Amino acid sequence: MTGKLITFEGPEGSGKSTQIKRLAEELEAQGITTRCTREPGGTATGEAIRNILQHDAVGEPLSERAELLLFTASRAQLVDHVISPALERGEWVLCDRFIDSTMAYQGFARGMDLETLGRINDFAIDHRPLDLTLLLDLDIERGFQRLEKRYSISGSADRFEREAHDFHFRVRDGYHKLAECSPERFRIVDADQSIDAVAASIWTAVKEALL
Ligand code: T5A
């Protein structure tokens, strides 16, 4: 039996990484083997690409098309080397960002053509269907407040976090439009609750959709 592919999406600081770990623990407790991964990244090639995308690692501005193709190259590598093999072993894959991030960030926020992005995404994932997408919905300001708290402890904002707030408003709005277009795949979770309350909402959504 093949596994399930669950993706986590949402604006910056909405709690995706935190909640992926929580869901993995819950699934493992039910005897389901899980594999957590992230985009961009998740493979050696993907992590090298992530470094270019997040931190201007090569020191020159990226063109929008180059940015798009780097994200989708990382995705193709992840699908072929991690996601597909895990699903074929019957594992459940939990992925921090996936095709909808490209639609929200490069499409709705940067303004690239959505139909073209859809075709490139489809090619990158080799037409693999997704079982469930959890959209962690959070006010942009609240997300940035969380990240600021984190940066007072470690590190500094990356290339996307430095984009104007307008950009991030378009990302959030774009996610809502994507969810409206695919209601059978998306579940919107209110991420402006305690970590435990968000985890409980996610668990309810997963049970209803997949168990
Ligand atoms: N991108 C990505 C594209 O433009 N196109 C693409 O195709 C793809 C795949 C990735 C960037 O690349 C862009 C989008 C992104 O800008 P990233 O570093 O992976 O960059 O960024 P994010 O995915 O946004 O990850 P973040 O770490 O910024 O946010 P998360 O994972 O949503 O949030 P998390 O869990 O790390 O939590 C953030 C902070 O909030 C606290 C946590 O402890 C942490 O400190 N927190 C809470 N605080 C209060 N209440 C809660 N409920 C909380 N949940 C978490």
Image (tube, rainbow, N blue to C red):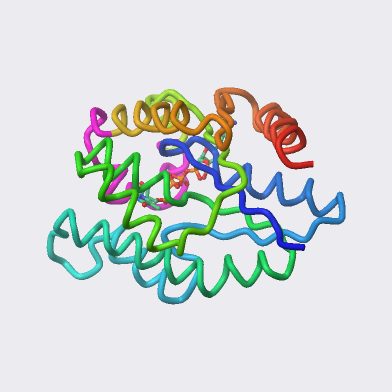
Q: Residue at x 47, y 59 (%)?
A: 127
Residue, x 39% and y 63% (percent of image)?
124
Report the span colored magenta. Answer: 148-167
Is residue 127 visible to us here? yes
Residue 141 at x, y percent in the picture: 38, 25
Residue 156 visible, this orientation: no
Q: In the rendered view of the protein, which quadrant contains the C terminus?
A: top right
How many callouts does the rendering have? 0
Give x and y (percent) for residue 16. 55, 43
Q: Is residue 170 above or below residue 162?
A: above
- Does 136 sit left or right of 103 as displayed? right
Q: Quadrant of residue 164?
A: top left
| Magenta segment main secondary structure | loop
Residue at image position (49%, 72%) is 43
Is 46 magenta? The answer is: no
Of 91 and 51, which appears nearest the observer? 91
Comparing 97 with 19, the one in front is: 97
- 38 lies above or below 30: below
